[in-house]
Amino acid sequence: MKSIPLSFLVIFLFTCCERQGNGSAEQTNDSIAHYGKMLKKESLAEKDRLNLNKKFLDYLLDQDNSRAVRRSVADAAENLYKLNDKDGFKRASQMLLELSNEKNDTLHKAKAYKNLGTYYLDFQKNDSSYFHYLKAEELALMAKDEPLLGNIYLDIAFIKLFESDFTGSEISASKALTHFSKTNQYGVYDAYNIIGVCSNELKNYERALEYHKKALGVFREHNLASPFHLGASSLNNIGYVYQNMDKDAEAIVYFEEALSDKTLFRDNPGLYAMLLDNLAYSKFKLRDLNGLPGLYERSLSIRDSLKTDPSGIILNKIHLSQLYDYLKQDDKALQIAKDNLAFAKANGVASDVLGSLKQTSIVDKGNAGNYFQEYIKLNDSVQQIERKAKDKFARIAYETNEIIDEKDKLEQQNRNLLYIFIGTLTIVMLLFVIRTQRAKNRELMLKQAQQKANEDIYNLMINQQNSIEESRAREKKRIAQELHDGVLGRLFGARLNLDSLNRQNSEDAASKRNEYLTELKNIEQDIREISHDLNREKHALISNFLAILNNLLEEQRSSFEPEVTVNIDDSIQWDELENTAKINLYRIIQECLQNINKYASAKNINLSIKKLGNDLSLTIADDGVGFSTNTKKKGIGLQNMVSRTQELNGTFDVRSKKGKGTTIDVKFPLHKKGE
């Protein structure tokens, strides 16, 4: 079967999720169902399955906190643990705890604490693990979830077994059995196994055999599938108990039965090496040296290659040293014992050091007293540590209850503080909204006043320009009348008189008269043209706005050095443009010219006003020194131009580089009067 690409699965699943968004609970449930369906595909690779779990967890984080979402977060955490992503497992468990606390979901809160206990147990942080399991136990009891309680007690049993609290571990495992259903035979197997191990350590060998055989019976009856070979493990445990009872012949039967599984070495080489060592040791105890030291050396070789069982390596070498001591190969026995003791001390496990000290004291008889004293001192220390470990769990349980009580008090105080904070925050926000609204009203009134002032200023400019135009028209008319009625009349009379002189026959007089007549005709024509021009409306004065703008540009030309080139689109209907737009456009041009005069040191200025569809475009470019547009602080003049452009609902763009001049582009929509 071909593997399905992760990209397809993620796109398919999260397209659905994105389309649904934070929609209804039904939509979220549909997305969760899609996720479950994708993960059940057998063709999905482990890496892709891991990535899909992570992405789905991110999706759940954005959903409403429903029971279905919390259940899915719990499932995702379980999947991440199975995929050996410990960090992802912890993240999902903490997320589940937060969501459960928010909704006071007792069951999922218990599962979250149980997960965190498992996380710390895997990293051998037993104190933290036990603390979280206790909280999980309390919540699971409240939720009355029997399977969950069984798993919690089983994990607590593992912790106590690791800490050598064998009695406590046995009690917890027995509690686990009372909560497991008939379907959870793996849990039953583990509980039987722990009780058997604890009984063996407590030297209650008959009870140990009873429970290890019960575990083996569960395995065989239900055919429990596992890559760890649970059947071989139980056979090894039974054989080990017989070995401790000095019934090595019976022990060998169980060891050899376990080793007869041809797949054991491939699937679980660590267990295979342990069985070889145990088999060899029982044979040695019976003084059956057939296959020795080969069995020991093969076991040690496997353990050395795995590098996962230092305690097994140490026990293996103790057995080898015992064999060579029995064979009277003293140097070899001593060398192995000393090397083993150094390795055990470096490994730091007290029980391993004790066993190595005991064997070294046997083969190094000259220094036996020193080894024995060290053994006694370390053994006393170990016993004290074990006693403290047993007391530690009771102390953690007591402190956990105290913490819970203190937490309840703090939660009440926090709730009170939260209510006070929310009330205070609400008042502050109301005051802030009121002040902000007032500020906005003041700003709006100021803008309206400014707009009115702009209108008034423009109207004043228009009135002033109208007065100028009226005076100019009257003056033109007066001059035209004066030229036409006065000068032109007199010149016409002179021409007639001179024409009459043409009747004289004097050659010199005729020449003179012709010259005067020609000159008078030229003067008469010039005066007529002047009169006509004065009475004709100029295109540049069609619009009062253009007249005002022309005045500004004429003042620029007369007062400052740069040459000004102007290009104004004739198709623009200035009379239809709102006065506010005209005054803002005028002020932008005025401000821009002032900036060029002050800072640019320019020689040429190009000004262009064009109509582009329904927009008006202004471009002013100079060839001055330029400036850097990346500076955060803008001048007041530039800020004013930007502000006026925003009032026009337009765009303002400035392009400049040092030494390359400056170009300013303003573009805004043409709004006619009344629109």
Image: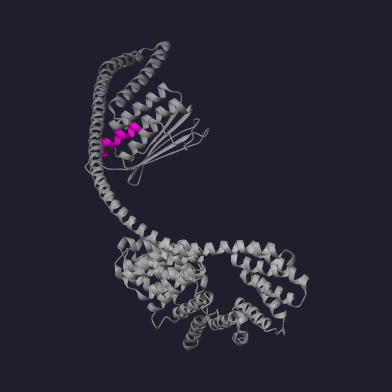
- Residue 655 at x, y = what percent? 46, 38
- Establish if 386 lies above or below 459: below
Asked if residue 449 shows in the view, the reply is yes
Q: Nearer the viewer, residue 327 or 31?
A: 327
Nearest the eye: 365 or 302: 365
* Residue 595 pos. (x, y %): 42, 28
Q: Quadrant of residue 469?
A: top left
- Give the residue drawn at x 43%, y 11%: 508
* Image vertical order of residue 501 relative to residue 200, above or below: above
Q: Is residue 133 magenta?
A: no
Residue 600's x, y, as percent?
47, 28
Quarter in which the C terminus is drawn: top left
Dividing the picture into quadrants, the one containing residue 128 is bottom left
Residue 322 x, y percent position in the rendering: 70, 75
Query: Which one is nearer the viewer's eye here, 118 or 193?
Result: 193
The kind of secondary structure the magenta stretch mainly shows is: helix
Q: Which region of the structure is painted magenta?
A: 576-588
Q: Is residue 584 magenta?
A: yes
